[in-house]
Image (spheres, rainbow, N blue to C red):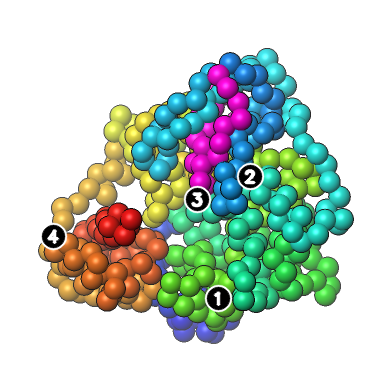
Amino acid sequence: MGLLNLLFGLKSFTHGIHPPYHKDTADKPIRRLPFPVELVLPLDQHIGKPAIPMVRKGQEVVRGELIAKADGNFSVPIHAPATGRVRVIELMPTPKGPKSNAIVLDVYEGSTQEVLWGQPQEMSDLTQQEIIHAIQDSGMVGLGGAAFPSHIKMMIPEGKQVDTLIINGCECEPYLTCDHRIMLEYPKQLLRGIRYAMRASGTSQAIIGIEDNKMDAVEVLRSHLSKGSPVRVEAVETKYPQGSEKMLIKSLLDREVPAGGLPADVGVVVNNVGTLASLGQLLPEGQGLIERVITVAGPGVVKPGNYMVPLGTPISHILQQAGYEGSRTEFILGGPMMGPAVSAMDTPITKGTSGLLVLNEPSIEEESHRIWPCIRCARCVYACPMHLNPSILGQMAAKRKYEEMAQEYHLNDCFECGCCSYVCPSNIPLVQYFRIAKAINREQAV
């Protein structure tokens, strides 16, 4: 932790980086885009088993209707983001890369698109297990990007004791500001969702961690808290990757999640602000997740901003509405540090998509560098928030010693934040090497 942070009392973690943040859309209120003519709804929008379709080709559905059910406990359902007709269920492009089965929905252009499905429920009457079940029924996953089923996070493993719910409002990725706007525009829904999450997880206190470049959000949320509330708001240092679970737990509570462990191992449950704000809105109405806020930004965007879009909206529709410039353009779903690049224009916005970043020719040229041999400068070592040695891991990856990387050099502790690649003066794509190594190790394990 730096001297300035100690002087001003800002909480943080060691290492990390300070990239240019480009938060130019932070003052752009959330706006709703027009509905597209079609929606593409992958059945695997979450970590876990894909949902099972409950509709058939040609079937009419209304907005909010359940169209795919969860396949077991480690899965979540999918609801219709619009009133329309099922065109087909087939393989379609996804942000994950490979094509996967998806429900393609033709949207009725003449419909009012009112949510016509849901069973209002009195949340104060529900037990802890009933709240967890309601969270799964809503189809909610982590909206920060991981897309981990939210109800699983609330189910504390046997033998573990948790006392604190941490709400991640850091939004440390450059360009993204959708969480910032949610905190400013939906504080009541967020605090309501926090209460539900505390009851579901059995935690006694909640801390909202927000980077200190969003002090307006800190002030807004504090103004909505009553005296003696078990919820408090803490400003933390603006530094990447402050929004990582392990980093935020360290910053706020000075607890370290053990290697290979989970937040529950140190008594913590972590959720994103967008996730809990959506739960605060959906659970009382008994409705499912059908839309989300995304940031559309980058030097290639004509009308950057924060937009509410139905899940399944193709990026081509968003680009048509927001406008973009450049003949050589790169599209990234999420932030530039961890978001995947996509090329297919019919790739849809899914539950885990927090943004659409558009880079045009000058930006692409700036990022196009020749790769040089490692000069052993150790910049990657001092940047890695997990205190790994990316230089050695990179050299071992080049020699294809993948199993040794995992067993002796803690490869699996890397969460692919991209700090090492960002600071490398030789432009070595270290994160890509680590992803390949992990994938090969997983295949061999299977």
Residue that label 1 marks: 265
Q: Is residue 43 above or below residue 113?
A: below
Residue drawn 36% across the image and 76% down it: 387
The numbered mark, 3 or 4, whose residue comes first in the sequence reads 3
User: Tag 1: residue type?
Assistant: Asp
* 71 or 394, nearer to the observer: 71
Residue drawn 68% across the image and 76% down it: 163
Q: Please, what secondary structure does the residue beneath circle 4 have?
A: loop
16 to the left or right of 309: left
> Overall secondary structure of the magenta stretch?
loop
Q: Please, what secondary structure does the residue beneath circle 3 have?
A: loop
In 3D space, how far apart are the residues under numbered discs 1 and 2 (Cα atoms)? Answer: 26 Å
Magenta-tinted stretch: 30-57
- Give me the disc on residue 341: none
Q: Please, what secondary structure does the residue beneath circle 2 have?
A: loop
Mark 2 vs mark 4: in front: 2
The reply to whether the magenta stretch includes residue 197 is no
User: Tag 3: residue type?
Assistant: Ile
The numbered mark, 2 or 4, whose residue comes first in the sequence reads 2
Q: Is residue 443 above or below residue 384?
A: above
**Label 2: how many Cα within 10 Å (few below 14, some 14–19, many 20+):** many
In 3D space, how far apart are the residues under numbered discs 3 and 4 (Cα atoms)? Answer: 36 Å
Residue that label 3 marks: 47
Residue that label 4 marks: 372
**Label 4: how many Cα within 10 Å (few below 14, some 14–19, many 20+):** few
Residue drawn 33% across the image and 55% down it: 446
The reply to whether the magenta stretch includes residue 51 is yes
Asked whether the residues under the numbered discs 3 and 2 touch, taking CB atoms below 8 Å apart as contact, a structural biologist would say no
In 3D space, how far apart are the residues under numbered discs 2 and 4 (Cα atoms)? Answer: 46 Å
220 to the left or right of 398: right
User: Tag 2: residue type?
Assistant: Gly
Residue that label 2 marks: 139
